[in-house]
Image (cartoon, rainbow, N blue to C red):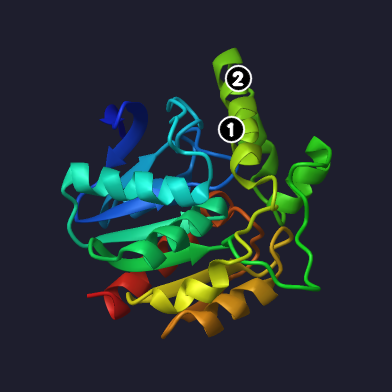
């Protein structure tokens, strides 16, 4: 995928783009992107994939106007306007799924479909989530991966001092946007009825960060939403089960979003 820098209202955004087909905006999760995401590469076989570093993550600037996920949703609507993207498929993982929800409740004029992968965003009383921010690195890997890929993924972040710096920058940015309240907007669920595009919820069958009850709740609250699980997978299906991840998304878009 090719990197470019896009200026969005004074914020320099690092954007990866590659593939051919209908445009697909991938909104990354709390761990960010490091260029070793085989599931995203697999999507480029069928889609024109656009994968930015969120403001404050990766090589993107902080944006003064973006103080929370709601602000970031409006920031991304500005990006879609700037890129003149019509009818884009939006895929969000973890806090990227939360961001996708915040975008969709505001304006779906440019959105053709929505895929939520192990999505944060809502809060269910009595159903606690695991805490990715207050745990050891070993425990974090056990949360993120069911079996395969954890060691290789961590090594990719340790490949150079620059990558290690970005890893730490991403952790700080994730905490900035989702520390309090943790991984949610307590009022979000009251607005999910506004989502009026085909929506698919994808969950790892061994997800350890956000319990499957959240997937069921999203399905119940979003009109017409569907739900599927990926086997042998925890929080990072685009790393751990890349072909199943890309295949599930492609199948949904072919069957429901055209």
Left or right of 57? Residue 135 is right
- Position of residue 106 measured from the top left corner of the image (x, y, whole percent): 37, 63
User: Secondary structure under badge 2?
Assistant: helix
Decide which of 160, 15 is in the foreground and name it. 15
Q: Is residue 161 visible?
A: yes
Decide which of 51, 1 is in the foreground and name it. 51
Q: Which quarter of the rendered picture does the N terminus lie within?
A: top left
Q: Which quarter of the rendered picture does the C terminus lie within?
A: bottom left
Give the vertical position of 213 relative to 89 (above or below): below
Left or right of 215? Residue 8 is left
Q: Is residue 243 visible?
A: no
Q: Which residue is mark 2?
A: 165
Task: Measure the C-alpha gap from mark 1 to mark 2.
Answer: 9 Å
Residue at 43% of width from left, 35% of height from top? 65
- Position of residue 168 measured from the top left corner of the image (x, y, whole percent): 64, 26
Decide which of 62, 4 is in the foreground and name it. 62
Q: Residue furthest toward the top?
A: 161
- Position of residue 133 measured from the top left corner of the image (x, y, whole percent): 75, 42
Residue at 43% of width from left, 69% of height from top? 248
How many other residues sit within 10 Å of disc 1, few (<14), some (14-19) or many (≥20)? many
Q: Which residue is mark 1?
A: 170
User: Secondary structure under badge 1?
Assistant: helix
How many other residues sit within 10 Å of disc 2, few (<14), some (14-19) or many (≥20)? few
- Position of residue 205 measured from the top left corner of the image (x, y, whole percent): 66, 70
> In terms of image quadrants, where is residue 196?
bottom left
């Amino acid at each position: 995928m090719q990197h470019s820098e896009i200026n969005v209202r004074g914020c320099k955004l690092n954007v990866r783009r590659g593939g051919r087909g209908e445009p697909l905006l991938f909104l990354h999760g709390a761990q960010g992107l490091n260029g070793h995401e085989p599931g995203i590469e697999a999507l480029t076989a069928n889609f024109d994939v656009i994968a930015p570093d969120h403001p404050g993550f990766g090589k993107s600037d902080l944006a003064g106007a973006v103080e929370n996920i709601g602000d970031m949703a409006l920031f991304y609507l500005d990006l879609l306007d700037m890129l003149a993207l019509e009818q884009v498929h939006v895929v969000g993982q973890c806090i990227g799924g939360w961001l996708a929800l915040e975008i969709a409740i505001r304006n779906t004029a440019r959105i053709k479909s929505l895929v939520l992968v192990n999505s944060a965003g809502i809060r269910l009383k009595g159903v606690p989530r695991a805490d990715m921010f207050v745990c050891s690195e070993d425990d974090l890997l056990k949360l993120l991966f069911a079996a395969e890929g954890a060691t290789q993924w961590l090594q990719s972040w340790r490949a150079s001092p620059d990558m290690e710096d970005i890893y730490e920058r991403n952790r700080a940015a994730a905490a900035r946007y989702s520390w309090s309240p943790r991984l949610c907007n307590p009022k979000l669920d009251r607005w999910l009825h506004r989502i009026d595009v085909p929506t698919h919820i994808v969950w790892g069958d061994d997800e350890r960060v956000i319990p499957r009850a959240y997937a069921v709740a999203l399905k119940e609250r979003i009109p017409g939403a569907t739900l599927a699980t990926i086997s042998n997978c925890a929080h990072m299906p685009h790393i751990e089960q890349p072909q199943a991840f890309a295949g599930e998304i492609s199948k949904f878009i072919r069957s429901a979003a055209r």
